[in-house]
Every structure is written in structure tokens, then in C-alpha cells.
Image (cartoon, rainbow, N blue to C red):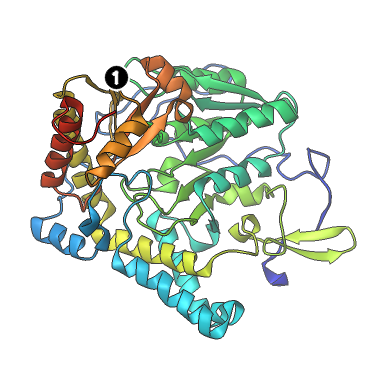
Amino acid sequence: MGDSKLAARKVPRWPGTDQCAGSGLLVPGPEPRILSFSQGHDTPPTFHKTQERPIDGPSVGAQELSAKEVAQLRGETPGVEGGIHLNNAGAGLMPTRVLNAVQEHLELEAVQGGYEAATLRRSAMDEAYADVAKLVKASPDRVAFLESATVGVAQALSSIPFRPGDRIVTTRDDYVSNQIMYISLRERLQVEVIRAPDGPEGGVDLGALEELIHRKAPRLVSVTHVPTNSGLVQPVEEIGVMARHRDVLYLVDACQSVGQIPVDVEAWGCDFLAASARKYLRGPRGTGFLYLSDRVLEQGLEPLFPDLRGADWVDDDLYQPAADARRFETWESSVAGLLGMGAAARYARDVGVERGGRRAFRLAALLRERLAGLPGVRVLDRGSRLCAIVTVAVEGWRPRELVRSLRAQGVRTSASELGSGLLDFRDKGVEGALRLSPHYYNTEEEVHEAVDRLEGILTGSSDSGP
């Protein structure tokens, strides 16, 4: 284990001291490929697109899954027999392959013991890291296994030695837990939190964001790729070019992205990317991962509270952090969950994230079209590019009431309350939203049936009421 560690560090070191990791300048990133910037850092760069193209979604030419393939995928998904599952933004249905990976290891633990079972499955665990890394086009040693995207974001934030007056630039659509963490940093460390405004179409105003990065010189730019409370897709690749041009650390929350949208950490230019496995990736609950770039390690960034998984205790007041992404992990974790997440990543790649995403996007568009025709229903999704998350407000109904009524009729959805997207919902003048989120294994018939059942609830022609 000692060979995988870097130079010893004195502790404690928070917040920043002369020995604090990451106190130097950041390593410049790759040459910009999307944007054209003026030379020098004394004038603000000017943003423009070099060509018209859909952002961060399945390409126009991606071949959609055939009816035969969809039938096969449904046959490998036991949960489709239990109702119409339109809650993939909450938790997708695990395919049999993922379920088997989890169950088989738990059975091995029951017979061999937890530590012994982990030793026996070491090769499979390594393969799981490799499969997750391939999903985001990273190397396995740059991926840490964690419980969720939120834990990943927390670990990433804790690794940055913020000082009073440092700035975080983010958006109005960032995930609620991330927003709460930013506020906590403001209260504890006097970090300034700056939210870039939205553009007229919805989503972050790139020109305003670019100006903030230039004028405010933030320590971190942090963006949620797909908000939990909206079908919006933020232009993370363009933002990454901006951040790299100014040598600013860049964090992407891809919790809702992985599994429905192809992810390329190098193309996006992110230093951290956090994701959960339970959603569109269709992995088990309590699993997720954090990607980190080379320059994160070159900076010596590490979480505020490492343990014996991420560091070696080498002398009375010295420890050595792991040389790779393991420094962001903790000792106690679910091996069954890791193997299940690896199986989910393999399954997603076998299906084809781009092909599956194209189908899920189309089903979501059909949902929006049908829902917009119902009395009292307002579709809330805004943005130049929308994904497979659909949100609506229904006059006279609370979202949770609709979720309960639909669930009673075999349609599984979820509710986004005001606190889930406070700024976005206030801008839209609503108290929350009913969220419907199809995946590639859903069918057009299920979409129509779900809308018909909702219409019956709203018109009083079904047994469910407010």
C-alpha cells in the first residue's frame, strides 16, 4: 500500500496553511475547442458557438433501439411487471444482471464472511472500477467509489482549501444539497457564493457566466448538468472551456446524467464529476462515484477527513495520502454495491447510452406533448435542450397528492417540492412539480396509459382524488 502513496503530509492543515495542498496555480487545461477567446487575461473572452448543434445529448444520428431490443430489455427488467415505472430520475429499475451481481456477492459474504468474500472477488472489484471509468471515458485510478453523488460533491468541496473571500460560481439550477453545502461554506469559511443568471430560454446564461468567471476569479465553478427538478440540460462542455481558460477548478454534478446522456470527462474539462448509480444507470441504491482529473492530484487536493482507505499513518503526526482517487474513498463500503454498479455500467455500455438516451428523450417529448393537452396542466421544462425528465404543475393539486393517486393506479412517479428547486420554482411561480422520468425500457403504450390515468384523476373519472 505504501507504493500507492505520495509524500507525507503534516496534520492538521485546514483551512489553508503554508503546507495546505492546492495553494499554487492550477495546471493549464487543453486548448479550447468550442470557444474563441481574446488573448490575455486582462480582457473578458467572448463566447460564441462554432456551429449549431444539440448540447450534451444523444446525437441526431444515433440509431434508436429497435422494438425487438426494447422487448429484450424489458424481459431483463423484472420491475416492469409491477406497474408503469416513470420514476427513473428517482431510482431506475435494476436489470437482472445487476440484481444478480449484488445478490451473489451477499450470498458469498453470508458463507465466507465479508472480508474473505472481498478478497475472493478482488479481480471483479477491479473490473467494476474499470467499467465505471469506461462509462465516463476516464482511467480506473481516477474514479473513487462512494455512496452517492452528494457524498462525491461533499468530498470534492472539502478538498479545496477555501479561504475567506474565495468565490464559488454556480447556477440557479444546481441541486438542492449542493446549494446547501455552498451556503454552509459561506457561513463557516466566509466563502462568497455567486449564482449566474439564467438566459431567456432557460438554463444558465453563458455570457453572464463567462463574465463572472473573468471578473470574479472564482476558486471553483460548480454546475449540475441535469437538475433534479427539471428536464434542463446545462452546457457543461462550454462551461468547462471557460473554466480551463481561467485555470479555475470545475465540478460537475452528473447524478441525473449518467445512463441517459453520454459523459466524457475530458471533453467536458471537469476536475471533479460526481454521480449516483441508482438513477438512469440502473444500479443499486447507496452507490455512486467521483471522478477527479490529473491536476486535482497534481495539486495535492484531498478530502478534509481521509481515513485509512485513503491514507497511511506513517509517523506520530504524519500521514501519506493515496496517489490516486482512492484518497477520496473510505474504508467501509459495500462490495456488493460496487459490483452492482460495475454491472450496471457494463449493461449501460452494452445497451449504448447514446441509443438508449435517444429513446428516453423521445418518450419524454411524447409525455410533454400529451401532458400539455390536459386541463390545468402546465409543463415546466425550459431550456434549449431537454432530457428524459418531465416536470409539470397541476392547478389545484399538490405534487405529492398526484404521486399517491397515480401510484394507486400503478403509475410510479415522484414529487419535487419547493425546496428541491427553490429558485427555479419561484421563477416559474409554482410550489413544486410532478416529475415523470421515462427510460429506454418504457414503451409508448405506457406513456399514453400513464397520461390517460392522470387525466382520469384530474377529471374525477377515476377512483383517486385530491
**Residue ID at (42%, 54%):** 277
Q: Position of residue 77 (x, y in %)?
A: 25, 62
Q: Where is residue 169 in the image (x, y as percent from the top left)?
A: 56, 26
In the rendered structure, the answer to whether residue 221 lies left or right of residue 261 reads: right
In the rendered structure, the answer to whether residue 5 lies left or right of residue 439 reads: right
Q: Please name whichever residue, 389 or 24, is drawn nearer the observer in this view of the structure.
A: 389
Pointer 1: residues within 10 angstroms few (<14), some, or many (20+)?
Answer: few
Q: Count of labels shown?
A: 1
Label 1, secondary structure: give it. loop
**Residue ID at (42%, 66%):** 340
**Residue ID at (73%, 39%):** 23
Amino acid type assigned to the residue bearing label 1 in the image: Gly
In the rendered structure, the answer to whether residue 167 lies left or right of residue 201 reads: right
Q: Quadrant of the C terminus?
A: top left
Q: Note whether 358 is above or below 118 in the view shown.
A: above
For residue 456, what is the image quadrant? top left
Q: Note whether 42 is above or below 402 in the view shown.
A: above
Would residue 56 be visible to someone looking at this image?
Answer: no
In the rendered structure, the answer to whether residue 305 lies left or right of residue 328 reads: right
Would residue 85 be visible to someone looking at this image?
Answer: yes
Q: Where is residue 95 in the image (x, y as percent from the top left)?
A: 30, 63
- Residue at the farthest front position: 463
Q: Please name whichever residue, 340 or 168, is drawn nearer the observer in this view of the structure.
A: 340
Residue identifier under label 1: 396
Q: Quadrant of the N terminus?
A: bottom right
Q: Note whether 183 is above or below 256 in the view shown.
A: above
Q: Position of residue 288 (x, y in %)?
A: 49, 54
**Residue ID at (15%, 46%):** 446
For residue 90, what is the image quadrant? top left
